[in-house]
Image: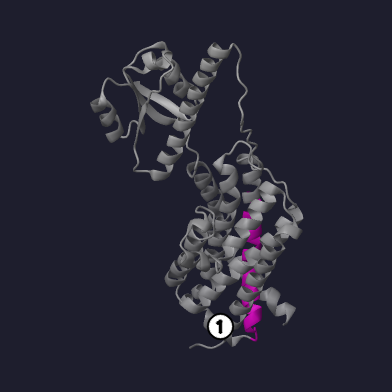
Amino acid sequence: MNPVRLWAVARKEFIHVLRDPRALGISIFLPLVLLLLFGYALTLDVDRVPLVVWDRSGTVQSRDLVSRFEGSRYFSLVRRVGGYGEAEEEIDHGRAMMALVVPVDFGRKVAADRPVQVQILADGSDANTATLALGYAESIVRGYSQEIVLEQARRLTGRVPAIPLELRPRVWFNTDMQSRIFIVPGLIAVIIMLIAAVLTSLTVAREWETGTMEQLISTPVRGPELILGKLMPYFAVGVLDLILSVLAGRYLFEVPMRGSLLLLAAVSAVYLVGALCMGILISSLAKTQLLASQMAFTTTFLPAFLLSGFMFDIANMPKALQVITYLVPARYFVTILRGLYLKGMGLSELWLECLLMVVFGAAMLGLAVTSFKKRLV
């Protein structure tokens, strides 16, 4: 490989990138825009569930129970209704997701230490959110019921009985259980894969479409020199995108970085090289920019978004899809990023994923170099 020819190709590609400020601006700011959109819009938190209440009892006890829902950050009392018809209308129009119905004899039975039931009506069209909201409601009712039992025991025995089993949960790594802390590191992997592959997927195809590939083929430049030379400017753009994404994650979304920055930089560079080479490989095979961009989007964004564990737990997928996820490099990079960001893991825990990233980068580089042939057909 001749370094002079390699630098000549890289310099030509640098000039081409700098002469197209719109494409350069998109390649630099699009990751930030995607990060802002996904980081703020994509949330798995279930807070402020809209709730309507039909308090048929109207007693001190029923108002106490309703106040527990009002005081919880998981529920937002929309209005008080006067019957099932109004509750159903609120749920049908989407103004409420749940309805709490307190029976007429609630206060009397609670005062008499007799069992009583309250009803929760939930909109189950969004099964995941409904399940979480029902869990919150059940927790509130269970806490209220426990206080009644303790008060009953205190009245009978004159002292507050000790609770035989008490759960004291402690959440590690994401103490406030905010979904953005979990989402943003994985989002960086998805965005970098998409941007890197799409950028380079147009490089070789553009040369074929504009007719300049024939001129390049007629020069002494060899295939590996051409591919690596084209790779260099986009690697620089990708590194800049990666730095901006990491800074946005740290200072905009306040995602803590507990692991090694050096390991993050090294693994990210390997991942970036693999993604860029994957784009060049697509570009060499497609020969047209339209087909290349479509192939890049289909083979990078969709697998990285759906099959990397970024959004959906791989363990809950069908077995066939679980096997396919092993072919998605973003799966390993998402694991590395979450391990570094949230758990402060190091190379001793992440060596297998790092090794697979190196294999991915080397395989894509080899395929990109060998796939390009200096011939017209």
Residue 12: tell me if it is visible: no
Pick whichever, 218 or 196, lies toward us.
196
Q: Note whether 285 is above or below 174 in the view shown.
A: below
Residue corresponding to mark 1 = 215
Q: Can you say whether 254 is above or below 354 in the image?
A: above
Q: Is residue 29 above or below residue 124?
A: below
Q: Point out residue 25 in the picture as x, y percentages from the top left corner.
A: 55, 54
Tag count: 1
Residue 69: % across, % down: 45, 24
For residue 158, side relative to residue 208 (left or right): right
Residues rendered magenta in the picture: 220-244
Q: Is residue 321 left or right of residue 82?
A: right
Q: Residues within 10 Å of mark 1 (few under 14, many from 20)?
A: few
Residue 326 placement: quadrant: bottom right
Mark 1 secondary-structure assignment:
helix
The residue closer to the viewer here, 155 or 87, is 155
Image position, residue 178 (x, y; %) = 57, 39
Magenta-drawn stretch, dominant element (helix, strand or loop): helix
Q: Is residue 124 above or below residue 24?
A: above
Residue 377: within the magenta? no
Q: Residue at x 47, y 21 (%)?
A: 68
* Type of amino acid at the residue the image marks with label 1: Gln
Question: Looking at the picture, how far across and down is residue 351, in whole percent?
Answer: 72, 63
Residue 238 shown in magenta: yes
Task: Please name the colour scheme applied to the rendered image.
Answer: one colour
